[in-house]
Image (spheres, rainbow, N blue to C red):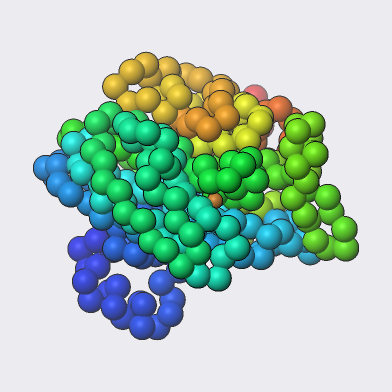
């Protein structure tokens, strides 16, 4: 979570000028952030009109150590940003398609009530911008994705992410929030280059299954962090495109799971592993009681070897009444 909102005016200008606005909580003028970060809570503000700006961007980047992939993305990251609005907001959504791209792109937002989740009216050719306006009627955590062309290649190449529609009054306060997104990549790998394979998609044999767009995105210097006693909320999405995720954190129990990302429906308590369907989401919350490294996995455990692993490192004093070696 960020405290940028209060100082956003001048700070945005300064950081942008310095070229270090990597977190881009407000890049493009909307309430968005780049994984694993999450925009500030909407909280108790009244409903209003919110402008969100996405840009379809094709780029080449790492998918694993020493292996690159030609990604298609929203805003140049995989997954795309997480956007945050509240129920009752009217969203003026701008989708531009970078002029250097090879493909038309659009966006199907699962939070939208309307044809194609918006995709029926927002397909943009390279160099074009499309705008559509929709009202967020139902709170929840929703997937968005590109649905242009044959769809499968646009989804498989990285065009997806999450939008959170908060309920009126906001979600309960927590200490930390993170954005984690699981996806499969179907590829033939040759000489440091992974190339999309339609055949592997049809066979449902992913070469990579990753959190936040590449192997190692949540490992090493990029682990998630928390302190003993804090409550952590993870906004978790899974695109598939084929696989159902069995999201689990080794050594933790989810105190609360907003099942299938629904807000206002069932909240399950004391959950070990939660099922997240293709193009679905879940919100999990848990208090971290004991210091140490906690490993995020898709517990369809062979997928760990394909990249479905990350870590949350918890710092603080040992809590021997909760956990200790020996008697
Ligand atoms: Cu696309």
The quarter of the image holding the C terminus is top right
Q: Is residue 15 visible?
A: yes
Total marks placed: 0
| Residue sitting farthest toward the left | 46
Q: Quadrant of residue 53?
A: bottom left
Q: Nearer the viewer, residue 65 or 31?
A: 31
**Location of residue 56 with respect to 232 vertically, above or below:** below
Residue 289, image x, y percentages: 47, 35
Q: Position of residue 2 (x, y in %)?
A: 33, 57
**Of residues 316 and 235, which is closer to you in this image?**
235
Q: Quadrant of residue 192?
A: bottom right
Q: Is residue 75 left or right of residue 199?
A: left
Relative side of 96 to 211, left or right:
left
Q: Residue at x 48, y 32 (%)?
A: 281
**Image position of 100 (left or right of 143):** right
Residue at (21% x, 44% y) in the render = 90
Q: Position of residue 63 (x, y in %)?
A: 70, 56
- Between 192 and 290, the residue placed more toward the observer is 192
The single residue placed furthest to the bottom in the displayed view is 18
Residue 50 vs 291, above or below: the answer is below
Q: Residue at x 58, y 45 (%)?
A: 149
Image point (42%, 42%), residue name = 119
Residue most toward the right? 191
């Amino acid at each position: 979570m960020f405290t940028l909102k209060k100082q956003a005016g001048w700070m945005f200008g300064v950081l942008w000028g310095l070229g270090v606005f990597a977190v881009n909580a407000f890049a493009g003028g909307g309430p968005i952030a780049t994984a694993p970060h999450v925009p500030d809570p909407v909280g108790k503000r009244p409903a209003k009109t919110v402008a969100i700006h996405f840009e379809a961007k094709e780029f080449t980047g790492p998918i694993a150590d020493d292996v690159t992939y030609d990604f298609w993305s929203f805003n140049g990251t995989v997954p795309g940003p997480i956007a945050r609005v509240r129920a009752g907001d009217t969203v003026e959504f701008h989708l531009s398609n970078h002029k250097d791209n090879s493909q038309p792109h659009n966006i199907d937002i699962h939070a939208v009530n309307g044809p194609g989740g918006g995709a029926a009216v927002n397909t943009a050719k390279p160099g074009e911008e499309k705008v559509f306006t929709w009202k967020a009627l139902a709170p929840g955590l929703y997937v968005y994705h590109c649905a242009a062309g044959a769809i499968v290649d646009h989804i498989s190449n990285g065009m997806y992410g999450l939008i959170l529609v908060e309920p009126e009054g906001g979600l309960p306060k927590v200490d930390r929030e993170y954005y984690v997104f699981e996806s499969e990549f179907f590829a033939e790998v040759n000489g440091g280059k992974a190339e999309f394979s339609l055949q592997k998609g049809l066979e449902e044999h992913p070469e990579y299954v990753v959190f936040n767009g590449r192997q190692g995105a949540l490992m090493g210097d990029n682990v998630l962090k928390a302190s003993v006693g804090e409550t952590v909320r993870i906004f978790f999405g899974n695109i598939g495109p084929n696989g159902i995720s069995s999201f689990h954190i080794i050594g933790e129990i989810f105190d609360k799971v907003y099942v299938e990302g629904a807000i206002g429906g069932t909240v399950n308590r004391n959950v070990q592993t939660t099922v997240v369907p293709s193009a679905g989401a879940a919100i999990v919350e848990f208090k971290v009681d004991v210091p140490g490294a906690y490993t995020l996995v898709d517990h369809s455990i062979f997928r760990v070897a394909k990249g479905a692993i990350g870590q949350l490192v918890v710092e603080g004093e040992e809590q021997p009444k909760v956990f200790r070696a020996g008697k």
